[in-house]
Structure formats: C-alpha cells, structure tokens
Amino acid sequence: QCRLRDKAAACERCTEHRLACTFDTDQDGRRDLISQERIEDMRAERDTLVELFQALKNSSDANIAPLLDLIRSKASLGDIR
C-alpha cells in the first residue's frame, strides 16, 4: 500500500515498479477518526448556537445586552459558552 504524499506525484515504490499509486482510504482508520472528531465538533458548535439562539429569543432586553456586547466584541464561540 502506498503512503499518501501528495495528489500529483506517485510514491517512489510505485514509480520504481511501474504500479498505479493508490491510497485506500477505507483501510486508513485515521481518516475515519478525524472525520468522526470533526462531526462531534460540529455537533457541539451547533448545540451551542441553538442555546445561544434560545437565550436571545427568551431573555429580557436587559439580560441580552451583555450577551450582545460579548458577541459584538468578536469573542469566540468557546468564550460565549
């Protein structure tokens, strides 16, 4: 199995043996792990945004002002949590 070096050039082993240089992503569990971690990160961000929306929707103007100030200060989503 070849190692993935870049998308354009074949690896040295395949070049020497005149083989098609391929990389089987199904056998590379790292990609699945990275994808799964990214999915979990996106779900957490979505949940935070839903909570933020609910807070903005259901809070009084007096309670919303500090939250809006924080958002407008370009705070990260993690800071807003």
Image: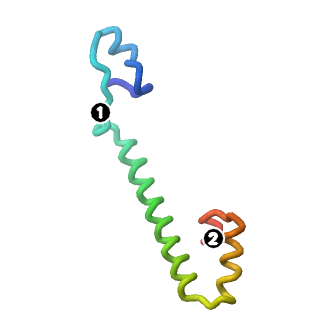
Going by the numbered disc 1, the residue's amino acid type is Asp
Going by the numbered disc 2, the residue's amino acid type is Ile
Quarter of the image that includes the C terminus: bottom right
The image quarter in which residue 26 lies:
top left
Q: Position of residue 61 (x, y in %)?
A: 65, 88
Where 59 falls versus 45 (above or below)?
A: below
Q: Is residue 52 left or right of residue 79?
A: left
Q: Which mark is residue 80?
A: 2
Residue designated by label 1: 24
Q: Position of residue 2 (x, y in %)?
A: 34, 24
Q: Nearer the viewer, residue 34 or 70?
A: 70
The image quarter in which residue 3 lies:
top left
Q: Nearer the viewer, residue 34 or 60?
A: 60
Query: At x 44% / y 54%, what residue is drawn?
Result: 37
Say whether marks 2 and 1 touch (CB < 8 Å).
no
Rounded to the nearest angstrom, the CA distance separating label 2 from label 1 is 41 Å
Where 2 falls versus 29 (above or below)?
A: above
Please name which of the two marks, 2 or 1, marks the residue nearer to the observer.
Answer: 2
Where 80 falls versus 35 (above or below)?
A: below
Quarter of the image that includes the N terminus: top left
- Label 1 neighbour load within 10 Å: few <14, some 14-19, many 20+: few
Q: Earlier in the sequence, mark 2 or mark 1?
A: 1
Q: Position of residue 23 (x, y in %)?
A: 32, 29
Q: Nearer the viewer, residue 57 or 13?
A: 57
Total labels drawn = 2
Query: At x 40% / y 49%, what residue is drawn?
Result: 35
Where 25 falls versus 59 (above or below)?
A: above
Q: Is residue 28 left or right of residue 59?
A: left
Query: At x 67% / y 76%, what residue is drawn?
Result: 68
Q: Which mark is residue 37?
A: none
Q: Give the colouring mode of the picture.
A: rainbow
